[in-house]
Amino acid sequence: MKYLWAFLFLCTSTTLLGGDYAAYGYPSNHSVIVKKHYSVMFDCGTKIPRWVVYDLSDKDLSFKRKRSGKWKADRSLIADCMMSDKDYRNNDYDKGHLVPSADMVRSAEAMQDTFTFANCAPQAKEFNRGAWSYLENKVRKWAKSHKYVIIYTGVGFNNGKPSLRMGKRCVPDYFYKVIFDPKKMEAVAFIGENLPTTIETKQVTVSELEKTTGTNLFNTLPVDVQTKIKNKIYRWR
């Protein structure tokens, strides 16, 4: 009953609008929280977000701002839905941002809004600070060179079944990113296993990523355009 109430609360307390990215559809439409700087699909059953989406431009990244923020509960969720600081004590996982704080240097408010447990999932420390950090840096470079991109970041579980590896808390088996250039109608997709031994993320087609994650990206576009975007490996520099 607790999770049913939370689901109804989310559906009635948010409006499915979003930024420019909303025009291309959401990966799924369950329990979407639309925030000022990003949208997030949150799963109260696992106590972590399943995906986020936001846009990022070269102008957004032109500001200079030091990383700052304090992790806190999200007002859009009831407390029982979320993990908290105590869940991350004495284990091998970082509080992994889905929307990186470094992508939200546009304002102090935007950066602080990334430090919410609605935007956080357990991430192996070595993976977070190594291969995943490298990919996040690449995304910011692409945002500058492409001028404007839309970014989808999410988590997943092998065989679609959450595993319990952090006490009684769910830990994702993998993290993924899709970076979309709506002007060129191109996208690149990456998946990385959430393990301390993961040294790099793997590039896949969007179609492969959808099959793995159970998502449906760019679903408002014509089918022929979707086919072009989803079935080709684009080599962005």
Image (cartoon, rainbow, N blue to C red):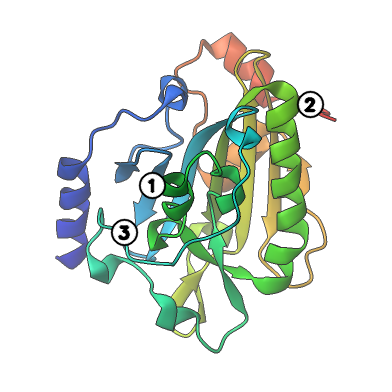
The residue indicated by pointer 3 is 74
| Disc 3 packing (10 Å; few <14; some 14–19; many ≥20) | some
Left or right: residue 35 compared with residue 170: left
Give me the C-alpha separation between circle 2 and circle 3: 36 Å
Q: Which comes before the other along the chain, label 2 or label 3?
A: 3
Q: Position of residue 126 (x, y in %)?
A: 73, 71
| Disc 1 packing (10 Å; few <14; some 14–19; many ≥20) | many
Q: Which comes before the other along the chain, label 3 or label 1?
A: 1
For badge 2, the amino acid type reads Tyr
| Quarter of the image where the C terminus is located | top right
Q: Give the residue drawn at x 54%, y 13%.
A: 223
- Pick whichever, 113 or 80, lies toward us: 113
Q: Position of residue 29 (x, y in %)?
A: 34, 37
Which numbered circle lies on residue 236?
none
Give me the C-alpha separation between circle 3 and circle 1: 13 Å
Q: Residue furthest front?
A: 64
The residue indicated by pointer 2 is 234
Q: Give the residue drawn at x 52%, y 30%.
A: 217
Q: Position of residue 114 (x, y in %)?
A: 46, 53
Q: Is residue 139 above or below residue 150?
A: below
Marker count (numbered): 3
- Determine the secondary structure under disc 2: loop
For badge 1, the amino acid type reads Met
- Pick whichever, 11 or 207, lies toward us: 11
Which numbered circle lies on residue 41?
1
Q: Give the residue drawn at x 43%, y 40%.
A: 38
Q: Nearer the viewer, mark 2 or mark 3?
A: 3
| Disc 2 packing (10 Å; few <14; some 14–19; many ≥20) | some
